[in-house]
Image (tube, rainbow, N blue to C red):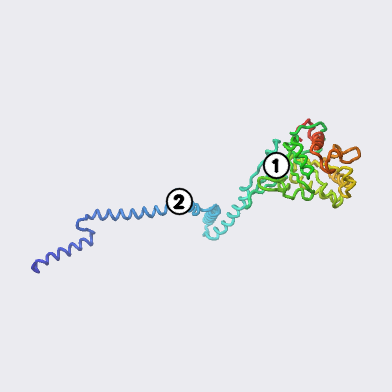
Amino acid sequence: MAKRDRCPLLIIAAAAAVVYTLTGFQPGFPASMVQAEEKASVAASSAAREKQAAPTADGNAEERQAKAPSPADSAAKAGQETGTAASAAQGTKPESKPAASAAAPEAKQGAESAAPEEKQETKSAGLSVADAKQEMITRTMTPSGYVRTLRQDRVPTALKSDWSSYRRYDAPVDASYFSDALFIGDSRTVGLSEYCPDLDEQATFYSKVSLTVKAALDKAFVNTEDGKKSVDELLSDERQFRKIYVMLGINEIGGGTAESFREDYGTMLKRIREKQPAAIIIIQSIMHVTAKKGSGDRHINNTRINERNAAIAELADPEQGIFYLDINEALDDGNGDLDAALSFDGVHLKAASYQLWYDYLRTHAYVSPPSGGGDA
């Protein structure tokens, strides 16, 4: 092609390049299609950004919760806005940072002070009387779990018994009288539960061979679903007994004095009363030994037993719901010793002899008001 023939083509190509640069025109692709693709690309990018920012239904709940303002932050923000509005009303320039820093501690303190109230709940002690439905037990959540405490100021009036109204009822009561009774004692009490099935089915027994006054509450010997527990722990639980029978002392008869024994016994009774304010407490005398056993033992004899019985009998106080029962009335011979026919070793009763003890308890019940077998 001649040089002069190529010039018009070069001019045309240059013009086309200028048009393409200015308009975005491409041969074979209309400008509208190019703009549509660009718009689609922008829309896709925008949708991707929105999808990335929006939480999913099951994946970002924790992230959402973490980003949500806490009650303290909300209170702080509200305090800051209140301070800003007040400052604006007075024509002064608000100081945002000091207001926020001042409000945040107050909000945090308010949240902390409200927390204990939210973690408190009350529960009935589960008694059979209607007044027990009132709030008696405070259960407080601690890091280690619930701690339950009987609040003396929340004990219903009906449970703060007028002990002076209680009278000994000498007619036999039936076994159901002992359904809310607890027996605390040593091997002799163990025998009472083993050989008096009617009583054992009704009453609760926290008894152990060789148990002493000092160890009675603190030694963990009662089997529970949560392992062995002490009587102190169990008395601190929700259950409130209405009658608590105690017979202890024979295992420590050889040590201390009658006075020291009375002091230890009184301390034990005080602890029981603090944990079981609705119960009457019945001190059972230390059971005698046979004359043969007593004459051959300088420690375990009826002279020492009588001294201890006289000492703990002084702890009885009907006005405070503490009564004394001399069990020996049912088991002694005519000389003030345990009837030898009732014992196989001079100290413990034969299996059949426990019925005499049980019968004595049934004919020496404490009730208010007096009735044939009603609840005390």
Q: Is residue 316 visible?
A: no
Residue at 37%, 54% in the rendered image: 48
| Residue beneath the point at 19% across and 58% down | 27
Secondary element type, mark 2: loop
Image: 344 above or below 109: above
Seen as rendered, the residue at the extreme left is 2
Q: Is 71 placed left or right of 248 in the picture?
A: left
Q: Nearer the viewer, residue 46 or 83?
A: 46
Q: Residues within 10 Å of mark 2 (few under 14, many from 20)?
A: few
Q: Position of residue 75 (x, y in %)?
A: 55, 53
Q: Is residue 113 visible?
A: yes
Residue 59: mark in rendering: 2
Pinpoint residue 274: horizontal percent, then vertical percent. 75, 46
Disc tally is: 2
SS for callout 1: loop
Q: Which residue is mark 1?
A: 239
Seen as rendered, the residue at the extreme right is 335
Residue shown at the point (12%, 65%) measured from the top left: 8
Q: Nearer the viewer, residue 291 or 98?
A: 291
* Residue 99 as seen in the image, left or right of residue 131: left
Name the quadrant of the C terminus. top right
Q: Is residue 231 left or right of residue 291?
A: left
Residue type (three-letter) at the residue carrying disc 1: Arg
Residue 323 horizontal/vertical position (percent): 82, 40
